[in-house]
Structures are given as C-alpha cells and as structure tokens.
Image (cartoon, rainbow, N blue to C red):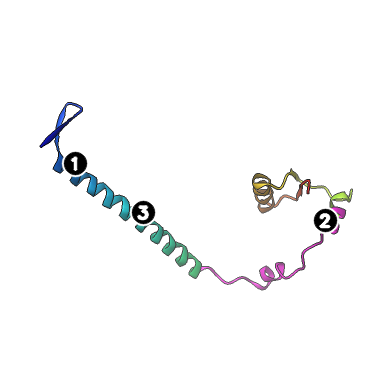
C-alpha cells in the first residue's frame, strides 16, 4: 500500500521507520544531553578551589537593617553610580549586574 505526498509516492513502511528513528533520536537527545551537562557541572565543581579566609569573612558580617540602609541612601556624602527603581525581576537583575561590575548600586521599591 502506498500514499502520494507532494507528488512522490512514499510507502507506509518508510514513513513508520523514519518516524520511529526520529522518535528514538529525540528521546536519546532529551535523555542524554541533561546528563552530559550535569556531569560537566559536577566536574567543574570538583575542580573549583576552596574559598579563601577573606572570601569567607565577607559572608560572616551581619546584614544591615532596613533603617540603616535608608539612612545610607539619605546620606548626602555617598553618591551611587546606579539607582534602580523597582525590585521586580528586571530590577533585581539590573542591580545584580551593576553590583557585579563594581558599581555602587542603590535599589528602591514602593514596599
């Protein structure tokens, strides 16, 4: 039995074999790629050097309170490089990007 598609005669057997091969390939891709990426991530994690004492000391400092942050923003002696208005997904991303580039960043939100 055959079927006519776009002027060409294609047998059902060829269609089934091609569809099965595409399905198996897609399944292998969807199952294999995440495992390869996870293996690469784990390998880089194992090769990472442990943090230094200075790096650990950064995270042992207590966080500043909201009132201290407001006083810092109102202080006329300090000038911020970037002012981000809104702490939504985009605002947080912009503030993080600016801070990681070494800019003095201030973020304000209505709440």
Q: Is residue 39 magenta?
A: no
Query: What is the x, y in percent for residue 11?
Result: 13, 38
Q: Secondary structure at mark 2?
A: helix
Query: What is the x, y in percent for residue 74?
Result: 88, 49
Question: Farthest front residue?
Answer: 1
- Residue 15 tag number: 1
Q: Secondary structure at mark 1?
A: helix
* Residue ID for mark 2: 69
Query: Foreground mark, 1 or 3?
Result: 1
For the residues bearing labels 3 and 2, Cβ distance under 8 angstroms: no
Q: Nearer the viewer, residue 11 or 32?
A: 11
Query: What is the x, y in percent for residue 110?
Result: 78, 46
Question: Farthest left residue?
Answer: 1
Q: Which residues are magenta?
A: 48-71
* Residue ID for mark 3: 30
Q: CA distance from mark 3 to mark 2?
A: 47 Å
């Amino acid at each position: 039995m055959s079927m006519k598609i776009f002027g060409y005669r294609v047998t059902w057997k060829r269609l089934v074999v091609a569809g099965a091969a595409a399905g198996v390939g897609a399944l292998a891709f969807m199952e294999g790629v995440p495992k390869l990426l996870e293996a690469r991530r784990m390998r880089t994690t194992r090769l990472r050097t442990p943090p230094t004492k200075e790096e650990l000391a950064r995270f042992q400092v207590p966080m500043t309170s909201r009132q201290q942050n407001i006083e810092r923003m109102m202080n006329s002696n300090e000038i911020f490089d970037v002012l981000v208005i809104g702490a939504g997904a985009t605002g947080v991303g912009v503030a993080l990007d600016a801070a990681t580039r070494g800019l003095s960043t201030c973020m304000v939100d209505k709440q």
